[in-house]
Every structure is written in C-alpha cells, then in structure tokens.
Image: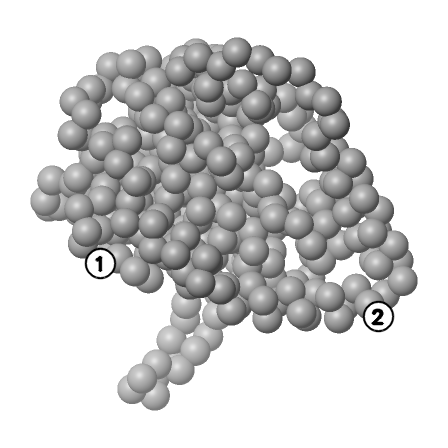
Amino acid sequence: MSDDFYSDDYPTVDEVLESHADEVAPLRRPVMLVALEGWFDAATAATSALERLMQSRECVTVASIDPDPFFDFTQQRPEAYIDEDGERQIRWPYNDIVVARGDDGSRDLVVLSGVEPHLFWQTYVGCVIRTARELHCGALVTVGANFDTVPHTRSPIVTGSTTNSALAGKLRLSRPHYQGPTGVAGVLQQRLDGDRMAPVSLRVGVPHYLSSSEHPKSSAALLRHLESVLGVPTHHAAMYEEIQRWAELHDTAIEDDEERRTTCARLSATTTAATTPPSRAPTTSVTPSNAFFASKTTSKFTQNSPQKLSQFLLRDIVSQHGFRTDPQYWRLDVPSRACESSRAVCRSR
C-alpha cells in the first residue's frame, strides 16, 4: 500500500508532512521509536519514557505533521500561553519527529513522542512510515502503556509482540490476539506487517487502581528494556528518587482507601503465587541455541535475559527482512556503558 493514501477526501502525506529528512547527515544504525498520548499511554508512562530518553541526547526536529486535519480541537484543546517576550501564543497538539543522536557511539534514534490523532489515521501513519524510510530506519518500535491488573508494589512487566509471524515464532514474541478497538500504534503495526522495516511493540502494565496518578516505575521499566534491546543508554537509574517519591505517594493513597488497599493485597498475593517456582523443578538440558528460552517460554521480557533478547531480536530482523547484516552495524553483543553504570548505581543504593 502506498504511503500516499487513498481517497479524494483524505489529506495526502505531501500536504501535511513538512520534512527535512534529506538534509540529515547519515545516521548510525537508526531505529524509530513511537509513543503517542491517548489510548496506548496509560499514566503517560510511554511518552514520559521517550521524553526522558531524549533529554540526554542531541535532538534535532527533522519532520513535523500539521495538526489541523487530524484533531477535533473540542476534544484535544490547544493551550494558550505567554512566551518569554510576554506575547500570547497558542500551543497546538504537536507531532514532531526528532533525530536523537548519541554522543557515545551508540545507535541514533528517530523519535516521535506526540499526540494520537482523532482523524485521517491512514494519512498520519503514512507520514510516520515515510519519514522512517527516508531516514533508513531498520525497525519501528511502538512504545506503550496500558492499565492492567498488576500491583504497584512489584516491578512492572514489559511485554513484546509483533505482527510478523516469522519474527514472533523465532523470538517467542506473541502475535497480538486482542480483538476490538485499537489505536494508531495498532494501525502502524498492521501497515508494516511483511515490510522490510520490521514492526515491534513494547508495552508495560500500569496498576489500574492508580489511574489518576503518574507511575514513573513503568516508564523506567520501558527505558530499561529499550536499553537492553537496542543497546542504547537510557539513564533509567537516574529516575530512582522520582520513583521512590511516587511510591510513597501511592502507598499513602492506598492506606486511605480500603477498596484499593484490598485490591493491591489481592494482586500482590496473586503475583507471588504466579512467580514462585516449584520446590522441585525438573531439570532440563540447555544448549546455546535454546538457553534464552529454556527458563521462560513466554513472550514477556525478563530481567535476566536482556542481552540474549537483543541478539535474537535484531539479528532475526536482519535475516528475515534483508537489510544490513554486518555485525558492526548492529553491535548486538556489546553491552552499553550506560547499562553498566546503571547497575553500579543500583548496587550502590
């Protein structure tokens, strides 16, 4: 399907996308990351994660999507503000695509941290895919968060999926089984099914009983897995104090609400039962080819397997979709310096 959709009633990609991608110097093994406020951004955990990721990188806007055709402004209100010169301005819903270059030799990222549109999704998705192709991105990763039946007292679980059958089978990622209303992230995944630019989804659960508050622990979980999968520094350990502050606020809110306190206790007990290993687990022969999947045959990324996951993920993307195969391009087996420094910070605490 062409990026330029579709019917005469649709705005075209050329009409709404202002791009300077042809002026960008060559990028280092780029991957595109997408997080959008709205359906797939519970407690703003996903967009907050990408915004924090960009804070530590040199960022340049390379494309902008005109908001006017895509939004019902009675639902997504623009904001009035006073600028530094004392002039009154209007801030419209933003959808800027940014190149975030690493200064430590790690891969460059192409990041869209914006607002999910209300209208003309096919054209909007076309804008995202065209920019990713123009910048020669090897993969497109949607990053999201959903309210889930998980306790705030435990580490959030990050889950991966893909619409590509070969990728799902080789990486033990789930194929999406959900049927029902979806968001732009779901449309992006479907549009890239079978494309050379492989689609991957990372999503984290947020406690449903804390729907009115922030949950930085979920943002940190997404950043930790992005660091592991892509080999880029995310500085998630720097969120420690913020996580602790919000944990105290969450604990206080739970103590003052009997219903939420009961819900949290029930979910904590269920989680403990589900994750406690049997006292006599059967032994299994583990070979190098199946070592990653021997202990966990699920699609959930576990903390003890990040490097293996990154190797399987991106090497399979390469082999299945026919682009760069030289090891120096992906550098999958070299842990990032930030990964080591993050562990050191955690140990020191």
**Image position of 257 (left or right of 191):** right
Camera-nearest residue between 346 and 261: 346
Name the side, left or right, on which 282 lies relative to 27: right
Which residue in the structure is indicated by mark 2?
A: 256
Front residue of 295/280: it is 280
Q: In the rendered view, would you say 15 is above or below 211? A: above
Q: If you read the primary sequence from the N terminus, does the residue marked by circle 1 or circle 2 appear first?
A: 1
| Residue 52 lies in quadrant | bottom left
x then y, percent, for residue 127: 33, 38
Confirm whether residue 129 shows in the render. Answer: yes
Residue 193 found in image quarter: top left
Amino acid at circle 1: Glu
Q: Which one is in front in this view, the residue at disc 1 or the one at disc 2?
A: 2
Q: In which quarter of the image is residue 55?
A: bottom left
Please count the marks in the image: 2
Query: Is residue 18 something one can see in this rendering?
Result: no
| Residue that carries the numbered disc 1 in the rendered image | 58
**Can you tell which mark lies on residue 255?**
none
Question: In front: 169, or 15?
Answer: 169
- Quarter of the picture containing the N terminus is top left
Q: Name the residue at 11% across, 40% down.
A: 26
Q: Where is residue 272 in the image (x, y as percent from the top left)?
A: 75, 41
Residue 317 drawn above or below residue 150: above
Give the residue displayed 22% in from the left and 58% down from the top. Answer: 58
Distance from label 1 to label 2 (Cα)? 44 Å
Where disc 1 sits, the SS reads strand
* Amino acid beneath label 2: Asp
**Tag 2 secondary structure:** loop
